[in-house]
Image (cartoon, rainbow, N blue to C red):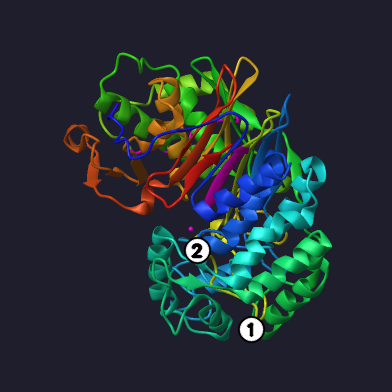
Amino acid sequence: MPEPTLTRKPLYAPRGAVATSQPLAAAAGLAALRRGGNAVDAALATAITLTVVQPGSNDIGGDLFAIVWDGSQLHGLNASGRSPAALTLDRARDAAMAPTGGGLGGAQGTVDRAMPLRGWLPVTVPGAPGGWRDLHARFGALPFEDLFTDAIGYAAGGYPVSRTVAQSWARAIQQWRTFSGPEYAEWGRVFTIDGRAPEPGEMWRNPDAARTLRLIAESGSEDFYRGSIASELAGFAAQTGGLLTADDLAKHASDWVEPIRASYRGYDVWELPPNGQGVAALMALNILDGLDVASASAEQRTHWQIEAMKLAFADAHAYVADPAAGPVPLDGMLDPEYARARRQLIGDTAGDPGPGDPAKGGTVYLCAADSDGMMVSLIQSNYMGFGSYVVAPGTGFGLQNRGAGFALAPGHPNVVAPGKRPFHTIIPGFLTRNGQPVGPFGVMGGHMQPQGHVQVIMSTVDDGLDPQAALDAPRWYWHAGRNVRVEPGVDADALRRRGHQVTVEDSSVYGYGQAIWRMPGGGYVAGSEPRADGCAVGY
């Protein structure tokens, strides 16, 4: 195992903690705890504030997933949205064949490749405001409106933009300049300063977002789905070629779901079921659980991790979809016998596996814990940076492009269809042992997320690292084929000798993670991603 580069010390807190990728948002969550709120209140105050202070990674127009330990058991919330009723496979295929750079913002050439990435077509109903409402209704202690105080204050009065956020914002503006069409104009008005991104430390404000957040707070999110915000979104879609309607918004509902798990060396790792990709992390851990990791060299272990993730992703991309549209073979995917069969496919060199047959066998992450033992693992996202780059005039927020996660191949479980949830990358995680909570964890960043979960869990369980050291450890990222990116500190030459095509680089591709573990003697120890701007705070 590569030695972690200790850039931060872990946080130890006796009563409660919050960890996320932007300090002002973490402070908002801590303030909720100090006002007598519980971990859900803290998580929501943090999440809502993140839409303002880290808008390139999440926004009011994004989705949300959460796992809550209520003191005795786990609860899962799927607050992701569905596609518009007018979005059909034929419409999506026609759009995918359109010339690049038009109103669809980045069609990828052929129908065999992918959904368009930007513009109206990949916009699905935002689930985050509904998720805030539903989490609060079931678990919240403070008044719902109180959770918006910091976010509204920063949106109305301004805040100095943090360094990593400013850097990603600048990259987003370069991309926005390549788009054309009336649906993109408002994004430029809201999210640029005379056509440029804010500099690190420069004050930025978004009064339209402050107005939207007030309406959501005062109405318990009802205004977003059935009130003036819904009317503004639907009206702008009708004017500029979007498919989203008032009826699509009014029909939105979150779902409470049972988390799924895999056992790894005496611990249970929990994820949410599809339409998210959390099952990929569990499948990889099931495969790795049968290997002698303890006596393996660092490069042997990294090789096994990469190959296990390839196998898990092959199945996840073949079978994960909206379970409401058709069954997902979860029992087979998580069957230990199936893991044993897949494990046999791992050799000494890099492979290119396909899916098996288990039927026979741009995001923010945060976590919070309180003095009563409640813990929350929450993730919300626009998807690719600023998402679709579509902003309805006067609303101050961008809409997600989650529909880009649909497949265009007829017959695929994840094929695009009306009123359907797409394959989702964002996944909250939770760790328990012997039925007792260890704590919430997560690593944001597209397809890095299950890979990050595996690496953080193995650093924790196999290496005994505290949350901060586990997050500090050098990471690897696999995306396709035999190409692997690694951070300095990972033995790239050893991986190359095994046939991996390795690039060593520092970049944001390795994701941003957070974790809070409950300590046996009481209190918490927390860590926050050293590659981002955030922090862990406690009291």
Residue at x-position 43% and y-position 76%: 100
Marks 1 and 2, how far apart at CA: 23 Å
- Point out the image quarter for the C terminus: top right
Question: Residue 268, position in %: x, y?
Answer: 57, 22
Asked whether, in this view, residue 43 is left or right of residue 7, the answer is right
Towards the viewer: 71 or 117: 71
Q: Which secondary structure type mostly characterizes the magenta part of the structure?
A: loop
User: Which mark identifies residue 56?
Assistant: 2
Q: Which residues are magenta?
A: 352-368
- Badge 1 marks a residue whose secondary structure is helix
Question: Residue 160, position in %: x, y?
Answer: 47, 66
Question: Residue 29, position in %: x, y?
Answer: 62, 47
Asked whether, in this view, residue 163 is left or right of residue 372, the answer is left
User: Which mark identifies residue 240?
Assistant: 1
Q: Relative to residue 171, is residue 523 depicted above or below?
A: above
Q: Relative to residue 82, is residue 136 depicted above or below?
A: above
Q: Relative to residue 402, is residue 302 depicted above or below?
A: above
User: Which mark identifies residue 480?
Assistant: none
- Badge 2 marks a residue whose secondary structure is loop
Q: Are marks 1 and 2 in contact (CB under 8 Å)?
A: no
Q: Which mark is in front, 1 or 2?
A: 2
Badge 1 amino acid = Thr
